[in-house]
Amino acid sequence: MTRSLEEIQADKKRLAEEEKEALKAHKKDAIAEVKKLIVEYKLTKGDIRGKAIKQLMGEWVCNSVEKWLESLKGRIDCQT
Protein backbone atom coordinates (compact mmCIF):
# COMPACT_ATOMS: atom_id res chain seq x y z
CA MET A 1 0.00 0.00 0.00
CA THR A 2 2.72 2.44 -0.94
CA ARG A 3 2.01 5.51 -2.98
CA SER A 4 3.79 6.32 -6.18
CA LEU A 5 6.04 9.32 -6.60
CA GLU A 6 3.47 10.94 -8.87
CA GLU A 7 0.80 10.68 -6.18
CA ILE A 8 3.10 12.19 -3.57
CA GLN A 9 4.07 15.06 -5.87
CA ALA A 10 0.43 15.71 -6.71
CA ASP A 11 -0.39 15.84 -2.99
CA LYS A 12 2.48 18.25 -2.36
CA LYS A 13 1.29 20.47 -5.20
CA ARG A 14 -2.28 20.42 -3.89
CA LEU A 15 -1.12 21.29 -0.37
CA ALA A 16 1.02 24.15 -1.69
CA GLU A 17 -1.99 25.55 -3.54
CA GLU A 18 -4.17 25.26 -0.43
CA GLU A 19 -1.51 27.02 1.63
CA LYS A 20 -1.30 29.81 -0.95
CA GLU A 21 -5.09 30.27 -0.89
CA ALA A 22 -5.14 30.30 2.92
CA LEU A 23 -2.44 32.98 2.95
CA LYS A 24 -4.43 35.08 0.45
CA ALA A 25 -7.50 34.82 2.67
CA HIS A 26 -5.49 35.77 5.76
CA LYS A 27 -4.01 38.82 4.00
CA LYS A 28 -7.46 39.86 2.80
CA ASP A 29 -8.81 39.67 6.36
CA ALA A 30 -5.83 41.61 7.72
CA ILE A 31 -6.24 44.38 5.14
CA ALA A 32 -9.96 44.64 5.90
CA GLU A 33 -9.20 44.92 9.63
CA VAL A 34 -6.61 47.66 9.07
CA LYS A 35 -9.00 49.60 6.82
CA LYS A 36 -11.71 49.30 9.46
CA LEU A 37 -9.38 50.64 12.15
CA ILE A 38 -8.26 53.55 9.94
CA VAL A 39 -11.88 54.60 9.46
CA GLU A 40 -12.80 53.97 13.10
CA TYR A 41 -9.98 56.13 14.46
CA LYS A 42 -10.17 58.67 11.60
CA LEU A 43 -6.47 58.37 10.83
CA THR A 44 -4.81 60.56 8.22
CA LYS A 45 -1.86 59.68 6.00
CA GLY A 46 0.41 61.50 8.43
CA ASP A 47 -0.92 59.48 11.33
CA ILE A 48 -0.33 56.26 9.48
CA ARG A 49 3.21 57.23 8.55
CA GLY A 50 4.21 58.60 11.93
CA LYS A 51 2.01 58.40 14.99
CA ALA A 52 0.37 55.09 14.16
CA ILE A 53 3.73 53.44 13.53
CA LYS A 54 4.91 54.64 16.94
CA GLN A 55 1.77 53.27 18.53
CA LEU A 56 2.19 49.94 16.81
CA MET A 57 5.83 49.67 17.83
CA GLY A 58 5.26 51.03 21.30
CA GLU A 59 6.35 54.39 22.62
CA TRP A 60 9.28 52.99 24.58
CA VAL A 61 10.85 51.33 21.54
CA CYS A 62 10.46 54.46 19.43
CA ASN A 63 11.92 56.69 22.11
CA SER A 64 14.86 54.35 22.54
CA VAL A 65 15.51 54.25 18.80
CA GLU A 66 15.20 58.03 18.51
CA LYS A 67 17.69 58.54 21.35
CA TRP A 68 20.07 56.06 19.76
CA LEU A 69 19.82 57.80 16.38
CA GLU A 70 20.41 61.18 18.02
CA SER A 71 23.51 59.84 19.75
CA LEU A 72 24.81 58.55 16.42
CA LYS A 73 24.10 61.87 14.77
CA GLY A 74 26.16 63.62 17.45
CA ARG A 75 29.07 61.26 16.87
CA ILE A 76 28.97 61.74 13.14
CA ASP A 77 28.83 65.56 13.47
CA CYS A 78 31.83 65.54 15.79
CA GLN A 79 33.92 63.47 13.40
CA THR A 80 33.49 65.75 10.39
Image (tube, rainbow, N blue to C red):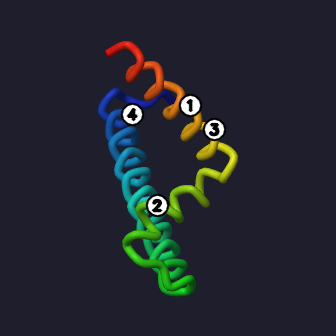
Image height check: is 42 above or below 54? Answer: below
**Within 10 Å of the Cα at label 2, are there few (<14), some (14-19), or many (20+) other Cα atoms?**
few
Q: Identify the mark nearer the N-term, 4 or 3.
A: 4
**Within 10 Å of the Cα at label 4, are there few (<14), some (14-19), or many (20+) other Cα atoms?**
few
Residue under label 4, please give it: 8
Residue under label 1, please give it: 68
Which numbered circle lies on residue 80? none
Question: Residue 70: percent from the left, percent from the top?
Answer: 51, 34
Measured Cα–Cα span from mark 1 to mark 3: 6 Å
Q: Identify the mark nearer the N-term, 1 or 2.
A: 2
Closest to the camera, between mark 4 and mark 3, is 3
Assess whether mark 2 and mark 1 are in contact (beta carbons under 8 angstroms): no
| Residue shown at 48% from the left, 85% from the top | 39
Residue under label 2, please give it: 50
Assess whether mark 4 and mark 2 are in contact (beta carbons under 8 angstroms): no
Measured Cα–Cα span from mark 1 to mark 2: 18 Å
Amino acid of disc 3: Ser
Measured Cα–Cα span from mark 4 to mark 1: 53 Å
Q: Secondary structure at mark 1?
A: helix
Residue under label 3, please give it: 64
